[in-house]
Image: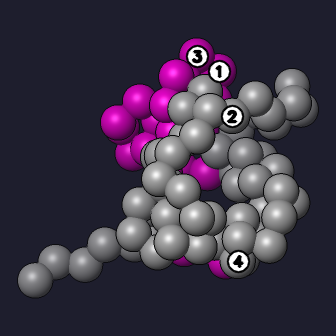
Amino acid sequence: MKAVYFAWVRERVGKTEEELEPPSTVATVGDLIAWLSARGEGYAYAFEKPSTIRAALDKVHARHEAALAGATEIAFFPPMTGG
């Protein structure tokens, strides 16, 4: 699965995208966030407040409870505001 990071999530993780191979126990967006948080300091900092992170599976907004099965891309980004 390809992971894409935007805005301050990208800055904290230190990369714009990467290929992920999470273990089979990672079944939802929330599970993936928890798994990523354990990968190192930058990830822990980026995902320290999981409830603020937004995600999209294959370019469609997804809740943290959404299943990862069949998705080829996940994007992570902070909340957006209009202006």
Q: Amino acid at mark 4?
A: Tyr
State the residue position of label 3: 70
Asked if residue 53 shows in the view, the reply is: no
x and y percentages locating residue 58 in the rendered image: 41, 30
> Is 39 placed above or below 61 here?
below
Going from N to C along the chain, the mark reached first, 2 or 4, is 2
> Is 34 placed above or below 52 here?
above
> Is 20 placed above or below 53 here?
above
Q: Quadrant of the C terminus?
A: bottom left
Q: Which mark is residue 45?
A: 4
Q: Residue at x 58, y 40 (%)?
A: 18
Residue stretch in magenta: 49-74
Disc 1 to disc 3: CB gap under 8 Å: yes
Disc 2 to disc 1: CB gap under 8 Å: no
- Specify whether residue 45 is painted magenta: no
Q: Residue at x 39, y 69 (%)?
A: 7
Q: Residues within 10 Å of mark 3 (few under 14, many from 20)?
A: few
Q: Amino acid at mark 2?
A: Leu
Residue 62 shown left or right of residue 39 in the figure: left
Q: Nearer the viewer, mark 2 or mark 3?
A: 2
Going from N to C along the chain, the mark reached first, 2 or 3, is 2
